[in-house]
Amino acid sequence: MKIPRIAYAAYGFAIVVIVLDQLTKAWVVGGLDLPEARQIVVWESIFNLTWVRNFGVSFGLFGDGSARWLLTLFSIGVSVVLAVWATRTNRRLLVSAIGLVMGGALGNVIDRIRFGYVVDFLDFSGLGFPWVFNIADAAINIGVALLILDAVLSERAARRDAPDAAGEARTR
């Protein structure tokens, strides 16, 4: 099977996310020794680096660690589906979104395999955001937002290009 050129962009985004995610986690674990410090105030009342071992998924689901391998397999499965989807689209926004979600999912898979938990450390609780997260989580959320945006934009384009009752394509 020949992989379309645009799919490589999704894979490239995924690789960049994985590398940034793993480098930042290595930095907070080894360079900053955040597990010992527990928290480093970066910007008073706004942003901290806070050590969290996330055994579950969002909002503490499966927080007891019982679903480690299930979550790992699920994330790998989602990434495979996304990798295939990237070969079947030609929309740049969709390819970017796929790459971000795939990279984020695989970044967290690496943690689950290595540590048995996901390393979270970005803490914006001073702004009222109660969850501590990491680069992979941010990439997944941005990717999902882009998936939604792509769906809305492609639906608008499909309606615009659909023939009207007289058989003519609509124009803007």
Image: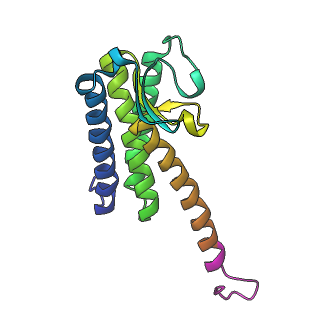
Q: Give the residue displayed 28% in from the left and 45% down from the top.
A: 15
27 lies left or right of 58: left
Task: Tell me if residue 81 is in the magenta stretch.
Answer: no
What colouring does the structure picture have? Answer: rainbow
Q: Give the residue displayed 28% in from the left and 47% down from the top.
A: 16
Residue 63 pos. (x, y %): 54, 15
Displayed quadrant of residue 81? top left
Residue 119 pos. (x, y %): 39, 24
Q: Give the residue displayed 32% in from the left and 37% down from the top.
A: 21
Closer-to-camera residue (76/47): 47
Q: Does residue 6 sit above or below 84 in this rendering?
A: below
Residue 83 pos. (x, y %): 37, 46
Q: Does residue 81 sit above or below 38 in this rendering?
A: below
Count of marks, rendered view:
0
Closer-to-camera residue (78/22): 22
100 lies left or right of 32: right
Farthest residue to the front: give it. 44
Displayed quadrant of residue 96? bottom left
Displayed quadrant of residue 24? top left
Highlighted magenta segment, given as a residue range: 159-172
Task: Tell me if residue 164 is in the magenta stretch.
Answer: yes
Closer-to-camera residue (17/2): 17
Quadrant location, the C terminus: bottom right
Residue 89 pos. (x, y %): 43, 60
Q: Does residue 154 sit above or below 120 in this rendering?
A: below
Farthest residue to the right: give it. 165
SS majority, magenta = loop
